[in-house]
Image: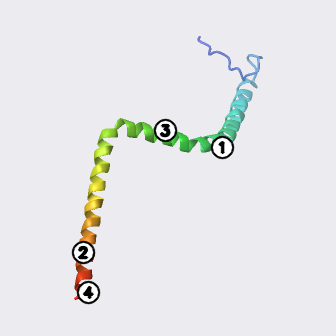
Amino acid sequence: MDHAAPSPFAPRVSGSRWTRPVRNGVLAAAALLGVYFGAHYLVNLAPVLGATGLVAFAAQFQRELFWVGLGFSAAGAAFVWNRLRQAEREHARCED
């Protein structure tokens, strides 16, 4: 019969009927404290971790993102150029 290693949180008395409830209670309390105190720190670190992930993603697709950005810039410039030409035509009609 294989026995698991004793938990560091369990009382040293083996075979006690309190071994499992005490161990579970201590683990539950430790988890609760970890969530309560750890959640505040993780919320503060979330933007940094998110930015790190975004930088890693962008670095992986840097060349493709460059071309996409260049295409959007060209499309934006063409759109503005078209709107300026339309505005000049409308302005010329108003002067006549």
Return the mark for residue 86: 2
Q: CA distance from mark 1 to mark 3?
A: 19 Å
Image quadrant containing the N terminus: top right
* Residue mark closest to the camera, 1 vs 2: 2
**Amino acid marked by disc 2:** Gln
For disc 4, the neighbor class at 10 Å (few under 14, some 14 to 19, many from 20) is few
In the picture of the structure, the residue carrying the numbered disc 4 is: 94
Q: Amino acid at mark 3?
A: Thr
Residue corresponding to mark 1: 40
- What's the distance in space between the residues labelled 2 and 4, CA to CA? 12 Å
> Which quadrant of the structure image shows residue 60?
top left
Tell me what residue is drawn at x 70 percent, y 33 percent.
30
Outermost residue on the bottom side: it is: 96
State the image coordinates of residue 7 (x, y, percent, origin top left). Answer: 68, 20
Residue depicted at x 24% and y 74%: 86
Q: Who's the residue at 46% across and 39% down the image?
A: 53
How many residues crowd mark 3 within 10 Å: few (<14), some (14–19), many (20+)?
A: few
Residues at discs 3 and 4 in contact (Cβ within 8 Å)? no
Instruction: Give the CA distance from mark 1 to mark 2.
Output: 54 Å
Foreground: disc 3 or disc 4: 4
Marks 1, 3: nearer the viewer? 3
Residue in the foreground of this view, choosing between 60 and 77: 77
In 3D space, how far apart are the residues under numbered discs 3 and 2 (Cα atoms)?
Answer: 44 Å
> In the image, what residue type sits under mark 4?
Cys
Q: Which residue is mark 3?
A: 52
Task: Say left or right for 51 vs 91.
Answer: right
Nearer to me, 68 or 78: 78
